[in-house]
């Protein structure tokens, strides 16, 4: 057990961020590993899939005992991904009525022209620059712009949203042993400012409703009733932070992977239709969400012959499962032609990422246009610097020379 604990600590340590995959391979030797603190780490595909679909494993953040940056953080109205049925199911249904299938099946696909226009404008901005930062100049502004349009945020306020998101993400990564208290204070203030802004925007939509998501949620009289104002703001925040950050990582990891595999880059340039399967392989090979931290067992659960005791906390290592050789042939090879690619990139079960269709389309358009329009892109440094989080893993900057 001590060995497994040290592997987990190595994975979480920043020094392993650039390439955690050899450590994940070592971890898979013990599919369900009990840690010294009584928690469990699960690292193999079959066992992760089983637990993602197991109703005895709770996602309710209010049951979790792991420390939070502050009491203010823990007192927020939880997003529905951090709740269990029936609360989770009701709030998710209400959101999906206005976000996608089955009630608005054409919503995401109808956004294709607008997404393409946003990407085109961003790439136009590369002109005259011998070097670009794929994160700052491309992958970061794209999804935040998209989510602002979905929510009905006025364009003149989009820059404020970006600052709020950056501060909120810093709070997610906050480490009191490394960061000054001002970082936490600024982040908590940003969260409060963002929630107040969204609440004000929601109030304005009641008087003048539009076709944006906030308007539709505020006016929903469906079979599940209405969300409270706090629940609407919480759902909007979920879209803004969780949906944005994962898409940034997916696009950035995609560009990095293509530059590391120039043969695949050239093939995508010649075969644009390859991008659909290529994005699915990216979700397996370099998933933007690597770890689902700290779910809680409602009752004793037996997994791979190991009893996870009631009340135990469980960490699901999605990135390890995505490279499990018992599920994927030659799993450490990036193969856009891979078949039967049922990856864990968007999780699974009732908490399967409901923004997955939009994230997929954003990544497909971004990578296709980047490859088509950016001439002779070359990495400045490999590996690039990574953000601190081992959960939402991606480069904090990705400098690329071109032309």
Image (cartoon, rainbow, N blue to C red):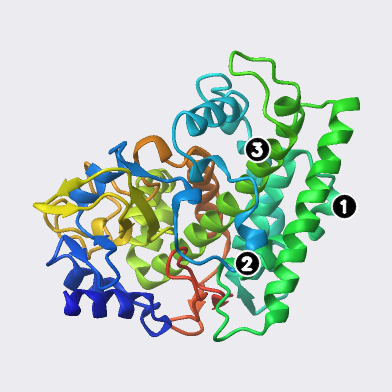
Q: Disc 2 designates what residue?
A: 70
From this view, report whether residue 25 is shown above or below residue 157: below
Whole-number angstrom distance, CA of label 2 to CA of label 1: 32 Å
From this view, report whether residue 35 is shown above or below residue 293: below
38 vs 241, nearest the viewer? 38
Q: Disc 1 designates what residue?
A: 156
Say whether residue 89 is left or right of residue 197. Answer: left
From this view, report whether residue 328 is shown above or below residue 26: above
What is the secondary structure assignment of the residue under circle 1? helix
What is the secondary structure assignment of the residue under circle 2? loop
Mark in the foreground, 2 or 1: 2
Say whether residue 185 is left or right of residue 3. Answer: right
Give the image location of residue 382, x and y in percent: 43, 83
Mark in the foreground, 3 or 1: 1
Q: Residues within 10 Å of mark 1 (few under 14, many from 20)?
A: few
Residue 123 seen anywhere in this rendered image of the structure = no
Whole-number angstrom distance, CA of label 3 to CA of label 2: 42 Å
Give the image location of residue 391, x and y in percent: 43, 64
347 vs 381, nearest the viewer? 347
399 vs 90, nearest the viewer? 90
Q: Residues within 10 Å of mark 3 (few under 14, many from 20)?
A: few
Mark in the foreground, 3 or 2: 2
Q: Disc 3 designates what residue?
A: 113
């Amino acid at each position: 057990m001590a060995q497994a604990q040290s592997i987990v600590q190595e994975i979480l340590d920043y020094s392993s961020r650039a390439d955690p995959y050899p450590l994940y391979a070592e971890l898979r030797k013990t599919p369900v590993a009990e840690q010294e603190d009584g928690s469990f780490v699960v690292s193999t595909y079959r066992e992760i899939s089983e637990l993602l679909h197991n109703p005895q494993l709770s996602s309710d953040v209010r049951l979790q005992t792991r420390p939070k940056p502050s009491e203010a953080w823990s007192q927020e109205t939880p997003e529905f991904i951090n709740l269990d049925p029936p609360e989770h199911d009701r709030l998710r249904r209400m959101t999906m009525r206005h976000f996608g299938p089955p009630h608005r099946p054409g919503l995401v696909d109808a956004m294709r022209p607008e997404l393409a226009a946003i990407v085109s404008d961003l790439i136009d901005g590369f002109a005259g620059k011998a070097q670009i930062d794929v994160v700052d100049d491309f992958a970061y502004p794209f999804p935040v712009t998209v989510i602002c349009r979905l929510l009905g945020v006025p364009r003149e306020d989009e820059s404020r949203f970006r600052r709020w998101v950056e501060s909120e993400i810093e709070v997610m990564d906050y480490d009191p042993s490394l960061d000054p208290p001002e970082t936490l204070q600024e982040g908590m203030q940003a969260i409060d400012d963002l929630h107040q802004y969204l609440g004000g925007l929601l109030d304005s939509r009641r008087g003048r409703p539009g076709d944006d998501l906030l308007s539709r949620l505020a006016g929903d009289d469906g079979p599940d009733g209405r969300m409270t104002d706090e629940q609407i703001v919480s759902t909007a925040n979920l879209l803004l932070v969780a949906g944005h950050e994962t898409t940034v990582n997916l696009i950035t990891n995609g560009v990095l992977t293509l530059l590391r595999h120039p043969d695949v880059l050239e093939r995508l340039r010649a075969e644009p239709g390859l991008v659909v399967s290529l994005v699915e392989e990216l979700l397996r090979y370099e998933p933007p969400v690597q770890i689902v931290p700290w779910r809680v067992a409602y009752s004793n659960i037996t997994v791979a012959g190991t009893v996870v005791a009631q009340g135990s906390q469980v960490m699901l290592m999605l990135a390890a499962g995505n490279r499990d050789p018992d599920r994927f042939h030659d799993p450490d090879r990036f193969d856009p032609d891979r078949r039967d690619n049922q990856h864990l990139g968007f999780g699974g079960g009732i908490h399967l990422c409901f923004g997955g269709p939009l994230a997929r389309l954003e990544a497909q358009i971004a990578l296709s246009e980047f490859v088509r329009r950016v001439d002779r892109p070359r990495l400045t440094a490999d590996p690039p610097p990574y953000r601190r989080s081992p959960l939402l893993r991606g480069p904090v900057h990705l400098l690329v020379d071109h032309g």
